[in-house]
Amino acid sequence: MKIAIASGKGGTGKTTLSVNLSAYLAEDEEIVLSDLDVEEPNSGLFINARMVHEEEKYKMVPEWKEDQCTLCGICQEVCNFHAVIQLGEMIMVFPELCHGCYACSELCPTDALPMIPKKMGMLKHLQNDKLSFIESRLDVGEEQAVPLIKQSQDYIDEHFTDDILRIYDSPPGTSCPVIEATKDADFVILVTEPTPFGLHDLKIAVETMKELKKPFGVVVNRHGIGNDGVLRYCEDKDIPVLAKIPNDRKIAELYSEGKLIYNEVPEVKQELDKIIAYLRTLKQGGVQ
Amino acid sequence: MKEIVVISGKGGTGKTSITASFAFLGGADVIVADCDVDAADMHLLLQPDFARGEDFYSGELAKIHPDNCTQCGKCAEVCRFEAISVIDGMHTVDPLSCEGCGYCARICPTNAIENLSMNVGKWYISSIKTGSLMVHARLGIGADNSGKLVAKVKNEAKRLAEETNKDYIIVDGSPGIGCPVVSSLSGASFVVLVTEPSVSGLHDLKRVYELVKKFNLKAGCIINKSDINEKVTQEIEAFLREENILHIVNLPYDEQFTKAMTNGQTIIESDTNGLKQMIVDSWSKIKLTIN
Ligand code: SF4
Ligand code: SF4
Ligand code: SF4
Ligand code: SF4
């Protein structure tokens, strides 16, 4: 089963939930946790594990071969992303804008734009007993997260069997990276704070999940602050609230030190138990 | 006219509350731009009237017209994004996977593929309670946040500021290190980094600062919730000294941030215990630095 943990915006406790839930589950069973927030991967800061494997990740971009080029201008015309531009007698490629569609390369009449790999980030595979952790990190200056998210998921598909529970720490927001990270998930947990900001972002996240036709539930983080708007909204819309993680300065302090929380704060463990119970019924097909 | 861009790497650091407070202090001198189009929240604090709105189109989406399609399969062959599959014997585009590269339409022998312009969201110019104007936007669901809508919001804000002779634009920047934040940062006179003293806060700060450095921008830093972890706060302060980043202020962990937000107010309007003065001083410090 694949569970994506997402939120309408960053900083709502998505990573905290991902790492604590994964570590807790991994006390009893094999778990794969993957940080798909490739622009700002943070989960790794909370996980002590040994490196199993590390690899550079590439995307394919065209490279101009001056001696083969007839300056016909087709490449510039076919690139929808303005990533190849003809400047006088030169063809310039802007790799950070390239989406790797191969159109310029394959439509060039003289094969003057072969596709070559360009590094866009790193993938790390770490292991701590039953917990496998996969982190991908986009290089600073690279503008597109989606190809790296896709390659991380491919890595997981190749290295782990389907029966192992996978937890995806998804990027924040509602645009392409989130869609890429959640579109294969069997269930999505939306993390939010019980404030007007939280409610506003939750509504957008809910719309996104409905659009994707994903089953989802909500975890309220920092329960006790703000107001009851989020809970009322969930009740109104029949959205299951899986857990309410209390607001506690102690949690913020442990988080700030990069520590796991569930063993230090009993209420957090209780709330995680509720989420796990929900996921178990889900796995048995009990919840639709 | 000076452009101040507030960013934080990741959300949840109080970036929007702080930006809105500066906007409130700047009052009529400041045009506000909410470039966090993916999770635009500033309107909850500044109460814009959504007076003028316009659809925003960017990018394309392939659509196959079944009447012209001979099911030859060429489109699926060239598509690198696995966006075309055969459903019930018909070649069909999955809109969520289509990157809008246009390759399929170019090679379809029967011209059965049309490129539709994508409506990716809506942008607005509003009057806000500070007595000024705000440019903001709402990105459509699953839309490609390629930074173009962010650029649109910024350019409109710039145009308005020039037309109305304003001194400042304050930009609530996008998160991450990808296209949207690059668009948020372009043209900035000064970058305010909002961070918090946690291992992840410091990590994100360093990562996003690499980007700021790449663009050669002047920057200052606000450490929010600085008393949550004194040790990391010191590490951040050391990093600021090392990189020559202006240390603007340390703000304490204070639930007043949340309370103000819950009431739809900036800190300036609601504070009773000192936070307000610290933000007033920070705003003066920023103005002094850039002028
Ligand atoms: S399509 Fe090929 S030959 Fe034509 S300008 Fe581009 S690189 Fe040169
Ligand atoms: S591969 Fe596609 S996106 Fe990249 S430069 Fe060529 S046409 Fe443009
Ligand atoms: S290339 Fe054109 S004709 Fe061939 S299957 Fe695709 S849409 Fe149909
Ligand atoms: S436009 Fe590009 S991504 Fe979309 S279906 Fe056609 S080839 Fe695939």
Image (cartoon, rainbow, N blue to C red):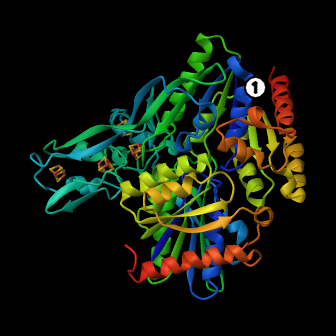
As rendered, which of A183 and B227 lies closer to the eye? Answer: B227
Q: Is residue A86 above or below residue A271?
A: above
Q: Is residue B284 left or right of residue B108?
A: right
What is the x, y in percent for residue B47? 59, 31
What is the x, y in percent for residue A207? 42, 51
The residue positioned 45% from the left and 56% from the top of the image is A236
The residue positioned 74% from the left and 30% from the top of the image is B22
Circle 1 SS class:
helix
Which three-letter amino acid code belongs to the residue tagged 1? Leu
The quadrant of the image that shows the C terminus of chain B is top right
Residue A95 seen in the current view:
yes
Q: Is residue A255 left or right of residue A269?
A: right
Q: Is residue B43 above or below residue A62?
A: above
Q: Is residue A136 above or below residue B23?
A: below
User: Image quarter for residue A78?
Assistant: top left
The residue positioned 70% from the left and 78% from the top of the image is A49
The quadrant of the image that shows the N terminus of chain B is top right
Q: Is residue A135 left or right of residue B27?
A: left
Mark 1 — residue?
Answer: B25
User: Image quarter for residue A38?
Assistant: bottom right
Q: Is residue B161 above or below residue B124?
A: above
What is the x, y in percent for residue A175? 47, 48
Would the CB of label 1 be found within 8 Å of ligand 2? no
The residue positioned 70% from the left and 45% from the top of the image is B8
User: Image quarter for residue B185?
Assistant: top right
As rendered, which of A48 and A72 lies closer to the eye? Answer: A48
What is the x, y in percent for residue B91? 19, 56
Residue lying farthest to the bottom in this orientation? A28
Question: Which chain does the numbered disc 1 sit on?
Answer: B
